[in-house]
Image (tube, rainbow, N blue to C red):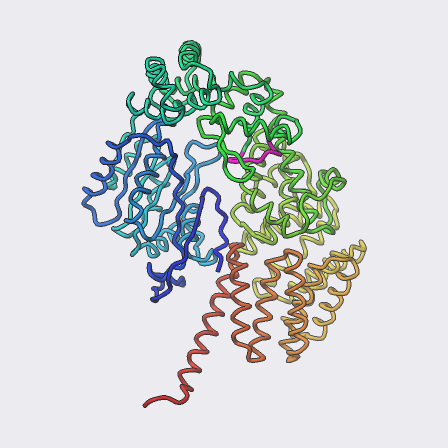
């Protein structure tokens, strides 16, 4: 089964492994033993072919790891300045000793010096646990519980963990496995003395020696050029300060200019150094000089792409958003991005994706400050924010084309061609770009553009509704509500209060949900917005229903339906009819429930909303099953599953699959029931939906019942 995790910072390749022995249980979570796990994570970053020397550091790492006396795993911290080669050194050490870690390698960029906030231990542990085979739905939300589960999962494993670019010891501690056979290598610009107090060993990674730096240059530009100009070559690596990144940047400049003598670059680098300011990080003036020289040789249009792409709010980006930054056609910018990759000023982060080295990003932004006016920089960031907003809104129109909107941005994107072919593709795109979208929202807030911030929230509703991502859902909507209030848009405030409340409702935070739904209702009443009032009543009904008060829920739903009928809003009528059917079902009024479900499905069909029709059919099928009409139930539920799956409504498809599994059991189709429940579990796990626990429990119950039945009826056999 797919784990369904998003590889935010990870490059993962997994290989099959045997399933031969039982595991243990940690709380409600089945913890697989080393021999039982089905996948072995191989997340280590590739080691550059030009990696040079470091024999002393590699030997020192061997000694440090071998000498540690504590009973737990070995921890080594590689500390040094940016660009000194800490990550390459750690990757080479682990790669050369891969046979010591048969249970895999875990990698994470903790982002201490990236453009966004450092990664939280909760986010990283979630990634690690998924990579180790733990279903998303079984991963606790709180850090202490996550840490305990991680230690249980890793207790018998032989793992190598590379925690790259760490900001603090607190980031790293939860990531240390429990097994004494595991190793954690941490890289940081800080020495992380608190980890040393825990028993970690710290290795200070110094710049390359002159001999090693010269060897790196030979490998990068060829031995002939270095042999022809030995003294300038030696001067060049000395001017680069022994920093591998600086040597590589200088080598890239020479490689693209084969007729240049090395002495020419040496003279230019020396001159530039005298008039360049230091980077924000101490002792790295030479690195800035190297970057400045590389940029100085770029064509003006390529240099512009470099400067303005450096202002991108997220970690990586595609050519289209870079084109938005410079306000040029994408085809022109693609060539510029390729040129920047060739010059080692930009890294290739995957198909049509690019990423700055952290020092290169600092330099690109400094170049933007030096060569672009404040208004020009602000405009570039605004265009990138607007690019993301337009794509979010366009994708949302594909996901739920009939939902009423209030954002003015929808009118702008309605006339554009659809960016994706269907709802599933739209949801997939939003999910892939979510980190960048959140970063764009933060940039909009920083640039005092609250009108854009709240519009992102409306556009992300379809993604959060179908794929959940509760952490980002709640975070972005807190920003959105504040932004709506700041620009005085009370309609937006009312809508986002409901959307945030729904996230809390789904995660069982009922008090918070009530606060947000009530706040939405109060705003809606104050501005006399009946549509918003109906939406708030509906969600207060959902809260009442979820907390065991179907009669109160019925009253709220009835209020919402009355408003929708008064305003002649067919889609809202479909929604509220289905809600009323659910309340009638739980009030033991089945005839009324059937009427509401059937009417909801009919109106949904008439207006062309196949997702809402599928949801009504699923509820009707479930009710038919409860009433003993298994044939009708089976037909309705199978059609609902297909319909919801075709339109990318995975979360609702999972609910229908649960009901279909019960229909299977009623017909004694146990194998089919388990298959449908496994499909539902996988969907919930991908979405990090708490309903996964319910499904997992149901599977366990069915399996136990089957085993008990088998024990009672063993059949013929030997006494």
Q: Tell me what residue is drawn at x 71 percent, y 49 percent.
A: 532
Q: How many marks?
A: 0
Q: Is residue 349 above or below residue 175?
A: above
x and y, in percent, of residue 349 in the image: 50, 37
Residues 558 and 304: in front is: 304
x and y, in percent, of residue 352 in the image: 56, 37
Pick the quarter of the image with the C terminus: bottom left
Q: Tell me what residue is drawn at x 41 percent, y 17 percent.
A: 278
Displayed quadrant of residue 646: bottom right
Residue 318 located within the stretch drawn in magenta: yes
Residue 268 located within the stretch drawn in magenta: no
Segment colored magenta:
314-322
x and y, in percent, of residue 607 in the image: 78, 58
x and y, in percent, of residue 538 in the image: 67, 57
Q: Is residue 212 left or right of residue 116?
A: left
Q: Is residue 285 above or below residue 115?
A: above
Q: Tell me what residue is drawn at x 67 percent, y 50 percent.
A: 521
Q: Tell me what residue is drawn at x 35 percent, y 30 percent.
A: 85
Is residue 501 among what the camera can see? yes
Is residue 498 among what the camera can see? no
Q: Is residue 279 above or below residue 571?
A: above
Displayed quadrant of residue 309: top right
């Amino acid at each position: 089964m797919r784990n369904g995790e998003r590889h935010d910072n990870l490059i993962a390749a997994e290989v099959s492994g045997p399933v031969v022995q039982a595991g243990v249980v940690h709380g409600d979570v089945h913890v697989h033993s080393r021999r039982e796990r089905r996948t072995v994570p191989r997340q280590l970053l590739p080691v550059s072919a030009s990696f040079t020397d470091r024999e002393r550091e590699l030997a020192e790492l061997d000694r440090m790891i071998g000498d540690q006396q504590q009973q737990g795993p070995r921890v080594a911290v590689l500390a040094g300045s940016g660009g000194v080669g800490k990550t390459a050194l750690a990757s080479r050490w682990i790669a050369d000793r891969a046979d010591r870690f048969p249970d895999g390698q875990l990698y994470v960029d903790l982002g201490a010096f990236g453009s966004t906030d450092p990664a939280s231990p909760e986010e990283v542990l979630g990634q690690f646990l998924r990579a180790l085979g733990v279903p998303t739905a079984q991963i606790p939300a709180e850090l202490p519980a996550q840490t305990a589960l991680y230690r249980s999962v890793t207790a018998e494993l032989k793992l190598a963990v590379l925690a790259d670019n760490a900001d603090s010891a607190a980031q790293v501690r939860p990531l240390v496995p429990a097994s004494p056979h595991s190793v954690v290598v941490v890289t940081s610009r800080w020495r992380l003395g608190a980890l040393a107090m825990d028993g970690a060993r710290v290795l200070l990674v110094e710049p390359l020696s002159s001999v090693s730096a010269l060897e790196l240059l030979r490998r990068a530009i060829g031995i002939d050029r270095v042999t022809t100009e030995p003294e300038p070559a030696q001067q060049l690596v000395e001017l680069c300060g022994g920093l591998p990144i600086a040597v590589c940047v200088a080598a890239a400049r020479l490689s693209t200019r084969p007729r240049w003598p090395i002495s020419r670059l040496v003279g230019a680098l020396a001159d530039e150094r005298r008039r360049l300011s230091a980077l924000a990080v101490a002792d790295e003036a030479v690195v800035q000089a190297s970057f400045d020289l590389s940029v100085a040789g770029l064509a003006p249009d390529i240099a512009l792409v470099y400067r303005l792409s450096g202002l991108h709010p997220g970690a990586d980006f595609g050519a289209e958003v870079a084109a938005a930054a410079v306000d040029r056609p994408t085809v022109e910018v693609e060539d510029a991005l390729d040129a920047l990759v060739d010059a080692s000023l930009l890294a290739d982060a995957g198909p049509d994706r690019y990423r700055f080295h952290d020092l290169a990003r600092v330099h690109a932004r400094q170049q933007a400050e030096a060569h672009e006016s404040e208004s020009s920089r602000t405009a570039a960031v605004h265009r990138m924010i607007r690019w993301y907003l337009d794509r979010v809104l366009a994708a949302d129109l594909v996901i739920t084309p009939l939902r009423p909107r209030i954002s003015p941005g929808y009118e702008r994107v309605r006339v554009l061609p659809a960016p994706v072919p269907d709802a599933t593709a739209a949801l997939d795109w939003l999910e892939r770009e979510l980190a960048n979208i959140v970063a764009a929202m933060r940039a909009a807030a920083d640039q005092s553009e609250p009108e854009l911030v709240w519009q992102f929230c409306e556009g992300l509703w379809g993604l959060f509704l179908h794929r959940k991502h509760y952490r980002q859902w709640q975070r972005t909507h807190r920003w959105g509500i504040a932004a709506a209030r700041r620009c005085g848009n009370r309609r937006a405030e009312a809508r986002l209060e409901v959307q945030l409340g729904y996230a809390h409702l789904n995660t069982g935070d009922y008090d918070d949900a009530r606060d947000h739904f009530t706040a939405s209702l109060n705003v809606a009443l104050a501005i006399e917005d009946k549509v918003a009032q109906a939406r708030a009543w509906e969600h207060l009904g959902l809260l009442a229903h979820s907390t065991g008060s179907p009669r109160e829920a019925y009253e709220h739903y009835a209020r919402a339906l009355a408003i929708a009928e008064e305003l002649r809003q067919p889609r809202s009528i479909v929604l509220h009819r289905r809600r009323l059917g659910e309340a009638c079902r739980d009030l033991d009024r089945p005839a009324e429930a059937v009427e509401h479900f059937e009417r909801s499905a009919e109106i949904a069909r008439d207006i062309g909303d196949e997702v809402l029709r599928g949801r009504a059919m699923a509820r009707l099928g479930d009710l038919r099953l409860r009433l003993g009409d298994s044939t009708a139930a089976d037909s309705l539920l199978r059609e609902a599953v297909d319909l919801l799956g075709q339109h990318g409504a995975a979360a609702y498809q999972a609910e229908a699959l649960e009901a279909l599994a019960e229909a299977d059991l009623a017909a004694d189709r146990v194998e089919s029931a388990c298959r449908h429940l496994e499909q539902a579990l996988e969907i919930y796990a991908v979405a990090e939906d708490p309903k996964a626990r319910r499904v997992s429990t149901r599977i366990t119950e069915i399996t136990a019942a089957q085993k008990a039945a088998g024990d009672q009826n063993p059949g013929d056999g030997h006494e």
